[in-house]
Amino acid sequence: MLAPFSRLEATVPANDKRLALACLKLGQHLKESSSADPSRVLTLALRCLGILGATRQPQRLHPGLGLRLRLRL
């Protein structure tokens, strides 16, 4: 999963929502596999929140996304 993430990271802007969701998914995968350093998982979660917070538009952001982020990470 790290190789596709790295390719996505290299091709999209740093504030792209797709990158935020990829950070979330990779962090979740690493957390569930228990093979990752917890600080790496936290870094991915914070990056996701930073991207979504910077691009947030109240009417367009799904209301359950915040809850989903808290439950998953």
Image (cartoon, rainbow, N blue to C red):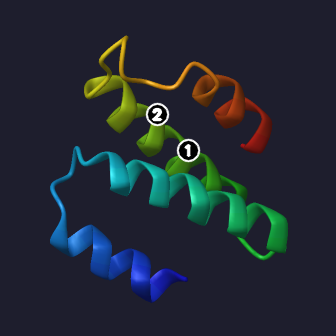
Q: Position of residue 58 (x, y in %)?
A: 37, 11
Q: Which corner quadrant of the image does residue 10 belong to?
A: bottom left
Q: Secondary structure at mark 1?
A: helix
Task: Indicate left or right for 52 with 55 as reference.
Answer: right
Q: Position of residue 73 (x, y in %)?
A: 72, 43
Q: Are marks 1 and 2 in contact (CB under 8 Å)?
A: yes
Task: Indicate left or right for 37 with 66 as reference.
Answer: right
Amino acid tagged 2: Leu
Residue at image point 33% right, 37% down: 51
Q: Identify residue for label 1.
A: 45
* Quadrant of the drawing holding the N terminus: bottom right
Q: Identify residue for label 2.
A: 49
Dot 1, crowdedness within 10 Å: few (<14), some or many (≥20)?
many
Residue at image point 58% right, 65% down: 26
Is residue 18 placed above or below 36 in the rendered structure? above
Q: Position of residue 64 (x, y in %)?
A: 64, 24
Residue at image point 62% right, 59% down: 27
Is residue 22 placed above or below 72 in the rendered structure? below
Distance of label 1 from label 2 (alpha carbons): 6 Å
Residue at image point 41% right, 48% down: 20
Dot 2, crowdedness within 10 Å: few (<14), some or many (≥20)?
some
Q: Secondary structure at mark 2?
A: helix
